[in-house]
Every structure is written in structure tokens, then in C-alpha cells.
Amino acid sequence: MRTRILLALHLLCCVMPAAASGALQTWIDLARPGSVLRLPPGTYTGPAVIDRPLTLEGNGQVIIDGGGKGSVLTIKADRVTLRGLHLRHSGDSHDAIDGAIMAEGRELLIEDNRIDDVLFGISLHRGGDSIIRRNRIRSRGADSADRGDGLRIWYSTGNRIEDNDIRQIRDITVSNSPDNRFTGNRISDSRRAFNFLFSHRSVVDRNHLENNSTGIIALNSEELLIRGNRILHAMDASGTGIALKETSAAIVVDNEIVHCAHGIMADSPMDPYNRIVLVNNLIAHNLTGIYFYGALGGHVAVANTFRNNLWPVSVVGDGDPMDDRWWGNYWDDYQGFDRNGDGYGDWHHDLLAFADRIWLEIPATKFFRNAIVLELLDFLERLAPFSSPMLILRDEAPRMQPWRDYAGRR
């Protein structure tokens, strides 16, 4: 009987492919576990639940409309594939996490789908070992705080999030989900591009993050690798390219961080044996290049390039600034020479706070940082200090030329 029904549906689709429509749940219920269901072109109604291993393909010509109720598709099975679908019109409940796809399964493949007019995009809950790639995800045109997350990964491990085009969302939230990899995604016009909470050993690699309030923020997430990303124009009042809080053993390498309120912001590692390591990053045109706060120490900065930042580095906290290690960085305001031609300055580079201490102690004065009066005061203090300047950092071997920028150009 099932075979006859499927054959009748197939013949109907062949006769009227452009008019194919109906409740998607009927098609799913008739499909055998492990089968490939290639939907004919048309618009199908949701919500629908996939409760068996299944491949659902739309070839870019299938629309699934949730009708403004709940999530458009809910997956409650392992080894499900969704490919080439246009998912739209979810419900609007933040509490119920209404969105395009609510997935609770393992070994899922969600690729080449278009998602728009939804609250949340794709949610992975208590699953893992899945791939989400080449999807186009948009939330709704509300204020960023009122949108849903483009991706929400919760208690899910071992996933690969690759080459997605994500815009106009709230955040990508990764919570209690270690060992996930985010590669080649483009995220823009959102609040937080990546928001990691208690998600250890995450890899954030070669993503393009532009015009977000914050690029990457990590809280209580250990052993992070943040590599090869381009983070541009995070210029909100609290905007930050990369923010690390209560996070230890993080490696930030080969990133391009340009035109942010803060390029990198971090406190000190919680574990005294761990380090936050910054290597070969281009940090340029930010209000503050790097901002360390709290107890000093636990940071290593090697071969980074500082160009045209209003303040290259700010350090606010207790302790000895020499507890942080700076070596081989390029500073565009270094005034030394390289007489032996080894590529490094003959003398260390000290960053001192003269009149700059005013904005450290009274943050509201940042607004006047380039005013003539403060520039004159800073100049006079450097000529004849009437108070001891504060050492912010010492680079023992400043480079005379940048090592290379993110794209590998000299």
C-alpha cells in the first residue's frame, strides 16, 4: 500500500511539478527510514517533524513555510540530511526557540539551504558530529537584541560549521559545547558574531566578521584557537574584535583586527600556568589596539603589528607590567634604530603613560583625547615630566618592519 501511495505522488509530481504543494509532514511520514526524499518544486507547509534517518532534498526549488508557528522543521533522529531547501516564516517565541531548524540528533548534514523570516536560524541541542555548511541565514528586521540567534549550539560537540553566510541575526551562541570548529563563515550586521560560554577547545578559523557589535567573545572557555580571522568595524561603544574573560590557554594568531573600539580585550588567565598568547596579528585603526585589565600577567605577545591605533595598548590593573611578555612586535611609533641590520631595534620599546594617565583614571576624557589641550599637555609632560610616567609595557626586541599581515603580504 505504501508503495502505491508513493508511486501516485511521484506521478502527480511529474504531471504538475510547478504546482506541487501540501503538508510536508505527509511526505515525511510516507518515507522509509534511510531513504532520499527529493521534493518536487513548490511550496510546502510546516511545521514538520523528522523522526527517522532521512535525506530531504529541494534542489533550491522547494519552499517550506512554517506558517508563523513554532519551528519550521524539527529533527529528532540521527543521520538526517537537509539540502537545497528554502525555510521561512517561523514562530516568534524566544522561550520556545522558534526558528528554521530545531535539531536533536547526531551525524546531521545541513547544507546549501536558504533561511529567512525566522526568529532563530539553526539550533543544535544535545547532539554532535554534525556538519552545517554553505547555508544562507537571516533573522528578522528587528533591533539586534530582539532577533534570535543565527546558530545556537547547546550541549553539542564535535560539529563543523563551515562557509555559511549569516547576516542580521542576534548572536551565534555556543554554550557548554566543547570541541567545535567554525571555519570560513561570513557574519555581518549582527550583535555578537561568536559568543562562547563554557565551550572549551573551540577552533575559530578563517571567518570574516564585519559590522558586528562584537566579533568574538569567550567566557570561561579554555584552550581556544582563534586563527586567521578578519574582524572589521566593531565600533559600538563597547565594541571589541576579540574579548576573552576568565579564559585561559587561548592562542590568537594570524588575525586581522581593524577599526574596532577595542581590538583585543582580555583579563589575565585564571590558571597561573596558562597563557593568553597573541602571535602575528595585524591590529590597526582601532581606538585601543589591546586592552588588558585586572591583575597583570599571563599574556605573551609576539610578532604582532600595531598600526595607526589611537592607543596601541592599555593596561589597567594591579601588578608588575613586566609580568607580561612582549617580543618582536612592530610599533609604528618606535623611534629607535637598527644599526646592525638584524631587523630588530637596538633598544627596547617602552610604552609609557604621561598625560595619557588622565583617560586611564577618568574614562570620560577619552572623548577629548585628540583635543589641542590634551595633546599640548602630553607634549609638555614628555619634555619635562612633573610626575613619573607609568610603564605600560616593554618590548625587548621591537621589529623594524612588520612580519606580515593576515593575508601574508609584507
Image (cartoon, grey):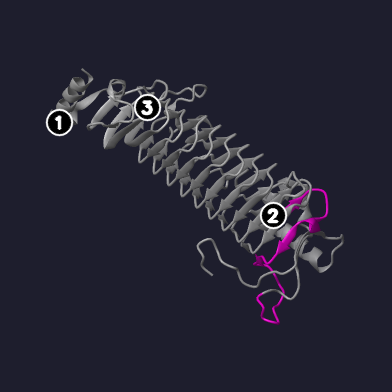
In this rendering, position of residue 222 left or right of residue 259: right
> Looking at this rendering, what residue extends furthest in the bottom direction?
340
In this rendering, position of residue 392 left or right of residue 220: right
Q: Is residue 211 at least partly visible in the picture?
A: no
Q: Main secondary structure of the magenta part?
A: loop
Which class describes the residues within 10 Å of circle 2: few (<14), some (14-19), or many (20+)?
A: some
In this rendering, position of residue 96 left or right of residue 51: right
| Amino acid type assigned to the residue bearing label 2 in the image | Arg
Q: Quadrant of the N terminus?
A: top left
Where is mark 2, residue-wise? 369
Element at label 1? helix
Element at label 3? loop
N-term-proximal mark, 3 vs 1: 1
| Amino acid type assigned to the residue bearing label 1 in the image | Cys
Where is mark 3, residue-wise? 89
Q: Nearer the viewer, mark 2 or mark 1?
A: 1
Q: Write down the region rendered in magenta.
A: 314-343
Where is mark 1, residue-wise? 14
Which class describes the residues within 10 Å of circle 3: few (<14), some (14-19), or many (20+)?
A: many
N-term-proximal mark, 3 vs 2: 3
Q: Quadrant of the C terminus?
A: bottom right
Percent across and percent down for residue 370 are 67, 57
Percent across and percent down for residue 138 are 42, 37
> Looking at this rendering, what residue extends furthest in the top direction?
1
Distance CA(mark 3)–CA(mark 1):
28 Å
In the rendered image, residue 341 lying in the magenta stretch gets the answer yes
- Picture residue at 64% right of the left edge, 64% below the top: 303
Q: Nearer the viewer, mark 3 or mark 2?
A: 3
In the rendered image, residue 311 lying in the magenta stretch gets the answer no
Q: Are marks 3 and 2 in contact (CB under 8 Å)?
A: no
